[in-house]
Image (cartoon, rainbow, N blue to C red):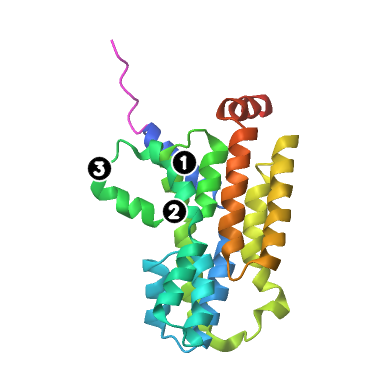
Amino acid sequence: MTARPAAGAARPGADSVRDGFVGSLALVPSVFVYGTVFGGLAAQTGLTAAQVLGMSVLVFAGASQFVAVPMLAAGAPAVAIVVTTYVVNMRHYLMAATLAPAFRGYPRRWLALIAHVINDESFAVAVARSRPPDAKVYLGSAAAISGAFIAGVAVGVALGGLVERPERYGLDFAFPAVFLALVAVQLRRRADWLVAIGAAVLAVTLALILPGNWHIVVAGLVVSLLAASVLPVDAADEGDEECA
């Protein structure tokens, strides 16, 4: 006979969602801060509160939003803004390809919404916990991260121009600080460090040579291919087990 779950016991799926949410709480303050910075900067360029919040909900991509706002303020052509932000977000293809197997059994009508909330922080949390990543862990994390970002944007818009130069207070470092934290927790072996350092050197070098944000795309693709050959899935899993 199959034992019935005790009354009031949480379902495994609910546990996974909660684990993803709780596991992302350490990142929430930084995400909230750079959401606030974005909201304030966007408000200072003349965008209305509805436009800033609408962009944050409909686009939900912090890096490309930071890139798009000054282009909007400068009166850049719409095509240029779309192409530039598309290039910045091309890394989402790589994340989506990694997450796709985890969401294989989900109804297609939900996949567009799930794809909309793909973000670096939740991806890192899900991948760091299991390979292949757990879909519900990812969704729990995405709920925490998206909520923090939108709340931060709302606060930033409300504050408006109170902080005209956020770099004076180090607030502009919130965005890169999140990514440094995401990378740090995954550097477990010598090969991980070599790949990370190589990616940093390559990205900085390309940034000095290539225009715009192409260094992000090129470095991401090159290093991903390199890591795939140096760190096979089986070896990565073995490394995780050794560290457990």
At x 74% / y 42%, what residue is drawn? 194
In this rendering, position of residue 98 left or right of residue 229? left
CA gap between label 3 and label 2 equals 17 Å
CA neighbours of label 3 inside 10 A, class few (<14), some (14 to 19), many (20+): few
Distance from label 2 to label 1 (Cα)?
11 Å
Give me the residue at 58% from left, 44% from top. 224
For marks 3 and 1, the one nearer the N-term is: 1
Whichever of labels 2 and 1 marks the residue nearer the N terminus, that label is 1
Left/right placement of residue 220 relative to residue 145 reads right
* Viewer-proximal residue among 232 and 238: 232
Distance from disc 3 to disc 1, alpha carbons, whole Å, reads: 18 Å
The x, y position of residue 180, in whole percent, is: 67, 55
Name the residue beneath numbered marker 3.
107
Residue position marked by numbered label 1 in the rendering: 98
The answer to whether any part of residue 229 appears in the image is yes
Question: What segment is highlighted magenta in the picture?
Answer: 1-9
Q: Secondary structure at mark 1?
A: helix
Q: Residues within 10 Å of mark 2 (few under 14, many from 20)?
A: many
Give the secondary structure at mark 2.
loop
Q: Amino acid at mark 2?
A: Ile
Q: Is residue 86 left or right of residue 205?
A: left
Q: Is residue 183 above or below residue 166?
A: above
Question: Quick one: quadrant of the C terminus?
Answer: top right
Q: Residues within 10 Å of mark 1 (few under 14, many from 20)?
A: some
Magenta span contains residue 174 = no
x and y percentages locating residue 135 in the rendered image:
41, 40
Q: Secondary structure at mark 3?
A: loop
**Residue nearer the viewer, 95 or 134:** 95
Query: Considering only vertical position in the picture, is 105 above or below 118?
Result: above
Marks 3 and 2, the one that precedes in the sequence: 3
In terms of depth relative to the viewer, which is nearer, 46 or 28?
46
Q: Which mark is residue 118?
A: 2
